[in-house]
Image (spheres, helix red, strand yellow):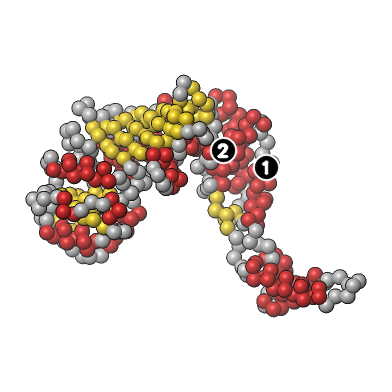
């Protein structure tokens, strides 16, 4: 991810246009990207200061400075830097400084402190070798971190990631994001919906008469809190959009210190290439729920749902999980509302009241202030309000009563 100071854009007729790497600039920067990747790869096991020096040694045009800083940032994001195992430097310093202070008080006016004697004394007190004392004295400074691992990638992939990172950086300033899927395959559409739910994005999906899906997402700048964390999730969601074939994205932005209202558009024509892994499962909290439910040993099995309920004139329902009775084959779906708006829950309840084709459990966080009593006893839906996590036993009880 690029920080805001590394996002390069220009303005055109009220829109923000990222400065993607194109033409001759892209050809020129391929050599720079190659050198940067090689510099990181050759620095495995070395200190951060050495890694930084290796990156600094890569030559580039002054006009490309901001791009190169962005490429370096993306490479360092793929690195694991950590301190070497060993004696605690803070404990060593405390011992060395205590001995040094004591020794200095005993010196005469013309005497000098014997550094080697101090280190030897600290080594004896801590049962370490004097060389270990020397090596570990300031081993916890950031510059002494070592490059433990590097998730390698090709120079071409690095440049492609940079272009995607520019678009992600722009979306961090969004108040609203709208994605239109025109003629997309059902599999890719489901994958997109699942990714939105996986990342906990506030969204609403509708379908028009022509079968085109419209996904409306709240942007980070539409929220009162958790802006940075939510914006990061929205950025992680973008690759799922890029994997679709027939789509258009439009975002409303607030830009700069003056919070100027601008727009941002993105589509397949920009040629952005996703490199992040596909989202194939459910959100981590639901994955934990699935494991806990399996341990109950009931007649019901649970799995991620691939079903999309697109009812005419209604918001599309994309359940998270499906429960199947191993004896009867009966299916009950579950849709979780955690970090969502209260309005989204009421919209789903209204859809269910007008007729829903399958039994479904709506798991709603307590913070959304929705009562379990709002649904009639004869409804195909069951409302479950949870405090912090969805309890497997509570869901099983509702399944057994269905």
Q: Do labels 1 and 2 touch, CB within 8 Å?
A: no
Q: Secondary structure at mark 1?
A: helix
Query: Marks 1 and 2, Cα distance to the nearest angstrom?
Result: 19 Å
- Count of picture labels: 2
User: Compared with residue 372, is residue 130 higher up or lower down, i.e. above or below?
Assistant: below
User: Compared with residue 267, is residue 332 higher up or lower down, i.e. above or below?
Assistant: below
Residue 384: x percent and y percent?
21, 55
Quadrant housing residue 348: top left
**Residue 5, numbered circle:** 2
Depth check, mark 1 against mark 2: the one in front is: 2
The residue identified by callout 1 is: 56
Name the residue at the right extreme: 110
User: Compared with residue 353, is residue 330 higher up or lower down, i.e. above or below?
Assistant: below
Residue 36 lies left or right of residue 220; in this view the side is right
Which of the marked residues, 1 or 2, is nearer the chain's N terminus? Answer: 2
Residue 152: x percent and y percent?
53, 46
Query: Between residues 145 and 336, which one lies in front from this camera angle?
Result: 336
Residue 153: x percent and y percent?
52, 43
Q: Secondary structure at mark 2?
A: helix
Quadrant housing residue 32: top right
Quadrant housing residue 203: top left
Residue 159 visible, this orientation: no
User: Compared with residue 85, is residue 48 higher up or lower down, i.e. above or below?
Assistant: above
Query: Between residues 211 and 171, which one lies in front from this camera angle?
Result: 171
Name the residue at the top extreme: 13
Residue lying at 68% horizontally and 62% vertically, measured from the top left? 138
């Amino acid at each position: 991810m690029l920080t805001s100071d590394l996002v390069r854009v220009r303005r055109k007729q009220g829109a923000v246009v990222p400065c993607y790497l194109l033409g001759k600039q892209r050809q020129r920067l391929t050599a720079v990207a190659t050198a940067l990747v090689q510099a990181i790869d050759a620095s495995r096991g070395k200190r951060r200061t050495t890694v930084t020096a290796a990156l600094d040694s890569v030559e580039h045009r002054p006009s490309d400075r901001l791009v190169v800083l962005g490429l370096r940032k993306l490479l360092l994001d793929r690195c694991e830097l950590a301190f070497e195992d060993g004696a605690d430097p803070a404990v060593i310093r405390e011992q060395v400084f205590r001995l040094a202070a004591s020794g200095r008080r005993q010196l005469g006016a013309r005497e000098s402190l014997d550094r080697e004697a101090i280190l030897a004394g600290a080594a004896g007190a801590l049962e370490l070798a004097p060389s270990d004392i020397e090596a570990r004295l300031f081993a916890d400074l950031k510059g002494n971190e070592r490059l433990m691992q590097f998730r390698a990638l090709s120079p071409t992939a690095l440049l492609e990631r940079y272009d995607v990172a520019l678009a992600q950086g722009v979306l961090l300033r969004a108040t609203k994001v709208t994605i239109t899927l025109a003629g997309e395959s059902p599999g890719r559409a489901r994958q997109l919906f699942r990714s939105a739910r996986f990342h906990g994005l506030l969204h609403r999906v509708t379908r028009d008469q022509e079968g085109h899906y419209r996904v409306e997402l709240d942007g980070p700048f539409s929220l009162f809190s958790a802006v940075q964390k939510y914006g990061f999730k929205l950025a992680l969601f973008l690759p799922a959009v890029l994997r679709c074939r027939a789509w258009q994205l439009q975002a409303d932005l607030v830009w700069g210190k003056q919070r100027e209202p601008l727009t941002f558009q993105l589509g397949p024509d920009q040629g952005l290439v996703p490199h992040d892994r596909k989202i194939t499962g459910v959100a981590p909290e639901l994955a934990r729920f699935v494991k806990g439910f399996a341990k109950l040993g009931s007649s019901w099995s649970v799995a991620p749902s691939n079903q999309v309920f697109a009812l005419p004139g209604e918001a599309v329902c994309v359940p998270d999980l499906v429960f199947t009775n191993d004896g009867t084959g009966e299916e009950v779906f579950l849709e979780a509302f955690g970090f969502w708006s209260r309005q989204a829950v009421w919209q789903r309840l209204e859809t269910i009241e007008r007729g829903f084709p399958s039994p479904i459990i709506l798991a709603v966080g307590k913070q959304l202030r929705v009562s379990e009593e709002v649904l009639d006893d004869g409804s195909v839906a069951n409302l479950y309000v949870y405090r912090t996590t969805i309890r497997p036993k509570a869901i099983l009880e509702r399944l057994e009563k269905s």
